[in-house]
Image: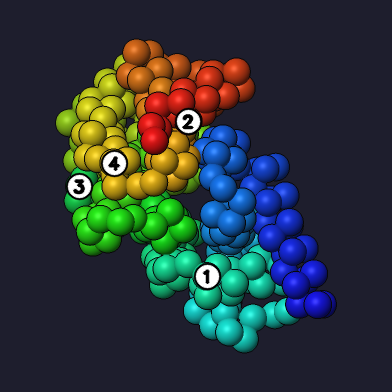
Amino acid sequence: MSTRVDLTEAYRECERITWSQARNFAYGIRLLPPAKRRGLAAIYAFARRIDDIGDGTLPAELKITALEDSRSAVFDLAHQDPRDPVLLALADVERTFGVPIAAFGELIDGCVADVRGTTYTTWEDLHHYCRCVAGSVGRLSLGIFGTSRDMTQAAELADSLGVALQLTNILRDVVEDRGMGRVYLPAGDAARFGCRPDLSGPPEALVALISSECAAAHAWFDRGLRLLPLLDRRSRACVAAMAGIYHHLLVRIERDPAAVTRGRLSLPTREKAWIAVRALAGAGA
C-alpha cells in the first residue's frame, strides 16, 4: 500500500514540474490518456533536470559531475534513490512502457557539449547535436506512445521531428544563446553570410543567416511529421499539438527573421490552446 501511495506522489510531482515548466510541450501532453500522460511527464521531468544542470550557475566542472551523476542514476533505475520522485516514476515507466532509457545518455552528452562550449562547423555536426538533445526525447516519447507499425521507422521519424523542434529552438534563441557563449549555427554557413564564428558582425548578416536556416528546419518538419499516421489517435493529437506550436513559431521566424534579434519570440497562450484543440479535432478516429 505504501509503495502505491509513494508512486502516486512521484507521478504527481513529475506532472507538477511539467505543467509549471513545459510551456509548449504541456499543451500536447495534456491530450494523452492518464497513464501515458503520467509517463511522458516523468520523461519530461528528468529531461528538465538535465537541462537545468546544463543551464545553471555551477562552475563547468561541477556541472559535468552533476550530469554524470544523473547518467549513473538513470542507467540504474532498479536501485534509484527512493526519496527521488522523478527517478521513482521513471523506474515505473521503464517497467510499464517500451521506453529506451539509454537515450537519456545522448541527452546528457548534448548537455555536456553545451557546458564545454562546443561549436559546429557543418550541418552534419549540428545534426548530431540536435539528435542528441532532442531526437533522444522523441525516441523516449515514442516508447510512451507506442506504434502498431514498424518501430524502427517510427523511431527514425520521431528522431527527425525532435531535430526539427531543436532547430526551431536554436533559431528562436540565437541571440540569447550567443550571450551565454553558445553558438549552434554552423560556422561554415555563418561565414558565407558574413557573420563571424561567434555570430557577431553586421545585424543584417545574422538576419540573412537565420532566414536561410529556416529552410533546413522546414525540411526536418516535413520528414518528422510522417510519424503521425503511425500513432494512435490520442498520441497523434499530442505530437501534432507539440509540433504545431513549434511549426507556427518557425513560420513566424521565417516571416520576420529580424524579430529574434529584438527579443525572445513565443506564441500567445490563446494561439497555443487553439493549436492543441485543432490537433485533437484533426487526429481522427
Query: Local crowd at mark 4 within 10 Å, few (<14), some, or many (≥20)?
Result: few
Q: Are marks 2 and 1 in contact (CB under 8 Å)?
A: no
Q: Which residue is mark 3?
A: 122
Q: Amino acid at mark 4?
A: Pro
User: Which mark is first along the chain, 1 or 4?
Assistant: 1
Mark pair 3, 4: CA separation: 32 Å
Mark pair 1, 3: CA separation: 39 Å
Which residue is painted at 39% across and 35% down in the image?
285
Q: Which residue is mark 2?
A: 280
The answer to which of 282 and 194 lies nearer the viewer is 282
Residue 228 x %, y %: 32, 40
Residue 164 falls in which quadrant of the image? top left
Q: Give the quadrant of the N terminus.
A: bottom right
Q: Are marks 4 and 1 in contact (CB under 8 Å)?
A: no
In the image, which is nearer the foreground, mark 3 or mark 2? 2
In the rendering, which numbered label is found on residue 64?
Answer: none
Q: Which residue is mark 4?
A: 229
Q: Amino acid at mark 2?
A: Leu
